[in-house]
Amino acid sequence: MTTLKAQLQEDLTAAIRDRDELRSSTIRLTLSAVTSEEVAGKEKRELSDAEVLKVIGREAKKRREAAEAFDTAGRTEQAARERAEGELLAGYLPKQLSDEDLAAIVAAAVAESGAAGPQGMGAVMKLVKPKVDGLAEGGRVAAAVKAALAG
């Protein structure tokens, strides 16, 4: 069984061999972010697959935000490239929860906590977060919790 970092390195080698500039540059930047995370702090360490997934998720989020910024600025070509890079990185991430599944998890947490109104958001988030970690973006989760608590 190969680690996620090893899989990224193999994919980088294949992308370079295939002369796929988009894949190779995206994977290079992601591996660079992984390496930066490994050497951050007082001593170098090897990241676990879960930690590498968090780095990939962070990089994918950067691509989505950059694409939105480029769209706002009218730079559609750069926005398209950022979206393509984000989709490539999404292939390494676990499948995201659908809106229906997320709403069901949130509804169960609201019922379990007995929270009502916006002041109960923290209690609900505390219950929901461990169940959806890595499967749904924080902004989506917060929006679903707000909607459930609003009624």
Image (cartoon, rainbow, N blue to C red):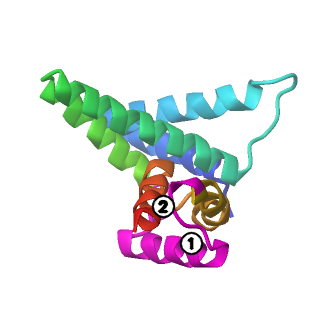
Res 13 seen here: no
* Placement of the N terminus among the 4 image quadrants: bottom right
For image coordinates 61% across by 63% down, the residue present is 124
| Proximity of marks 1 and 2: CB atoms separated by less than 8 Å | yes
Q: In this figure, what is the number of numbered marks?
A: 2
User: Horizontal placement of 56 versus 22: left or right?
Assistant: right
Residue 110: mark in rendering: 1
The magenta segment: 92-119
Q: Position of residue 125 (x, y in %)?
A: 60, 58
In the depicted view, which residue is nearer to us: 137 or 122? 122
In the depicted view, which residue is nearer to us: 45 or 138? 138
Q: Residues within 10 Å of mark 2 (few under 14, many from 20)?
A: many
Q: Residue furthest right?
A: 43
Q: Residues within 10 Å of mark 1 (few under 14, many from 20)?
A: many
For image coordinates 44% across by 45% down, the residue present is 14
Residue 145: mark in rendering: 2
For image coordinates 60% across by 67% down, the residue present is 115
For image coordinates 48% across by 47% down, the residue present is 11
User: Horizontal placement of 69 versus 57: left or right?
Assistant: left
